[in-house]
């Protein structure tokens, strides 16, 4: 794979991660607003009966607010990732790691994403999988949950 092809692939992976993460943020924001609206609509009703309903809505709203905060934090991480290709000896933030079993994109934890007909697993630098591969180089094998992975390429 040429340097230009690697750069294009990284840009597409980054764009897909941003799209998925933005969708998560938008979903959490809308859910938070919906719950808040539902709680506000209960005002004016019999206060005692609906006080516990409003409290339950507040708990849900706080849950969605945390999800929104996490999604926005992940978007900030994605904004800082390099958009061009640089050579890497070891896995690091923004790299693609190709093993004999799977392909990984080190960015934020999003799970499986597909780009150019290939499946990649977007993982965070804090994930156990990344921690297992962190000091490995091309040609070396690391073990995760008892399964060996041989690194074939890092770019």
Image (cartoon, rainbow, N blue to C red):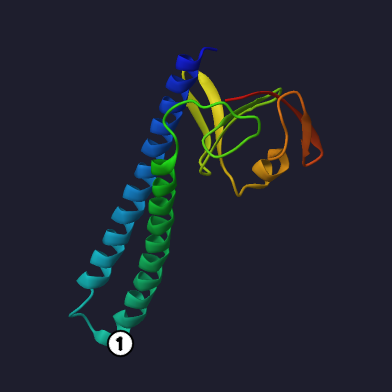
| Residue 4 vertical placement versus 92 (above, below) | above
Which corner quadrant holds the C terminus? top right
Q: Residue at x 29, y 54 (%)?
A: 30
Q: Residue at x 65, y 27 (%)?
A: 102
In percent of width and height, residue 25 lies at 36, 49
Answer with left or right where residue 74 lies relative to residue 106: left
In percent of width and height, residue 61 lies at 35, 66
| Residue 107 vertical placement versus 116 (above, below) | below
Q: Nearer the viewer, residue 86 or 141?
A: 86
Q: Nearer the viewer, residue 150 or 145?
A: 150
| Residue 63 vertical placement versus 138 (above, below) | below
Q: Residue at x 67, y 42 (%)?
A: 129
In percent of width and height, residue 118 lies at 53, 20
Q: Residue at x 40, y 71 (%)?
A: 59
Q: Quadrant of residue 54?
A: bottom left
Q: Quadrant of residue 83?
A: top left
According to the image, label 1 marks what residue? 48
Q: Residue furthest bottom?
A: 48
């Amino acid at each position: 794979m040429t340097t230009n092809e690697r750069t294009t692939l990284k840009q597409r992976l980054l764009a897909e991660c941003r799209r998925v993460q933005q969708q998560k943020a938008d979903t959490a924001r809308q859910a938070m607003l919906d719950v808040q609206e539902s709680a506000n609509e209960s005002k004016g009703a019999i206060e005692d009966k609906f006080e516990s309903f409003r409290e339950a809505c507040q708990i849900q709203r706080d849950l969605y607010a945390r999800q929104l905060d996490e999604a926005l934090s992940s978007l900030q991480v994605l904004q800082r990732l390099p958009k061009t290709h640089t050579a890497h000896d070891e896995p690091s933030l923004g790299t693609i790691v190709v093993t004999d079993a799977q392909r990984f994109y080190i960015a934020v934890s999003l799970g499986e994403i597909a780009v150019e007909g290939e499946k990649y697993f977007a993982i965070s630098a804090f994930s156990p999988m990344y921690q297992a591969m962190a000091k490995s180089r091309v040609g070396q094998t690391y073990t995760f949950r008892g399964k060996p992975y041989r690194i074939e390429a890092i770019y």
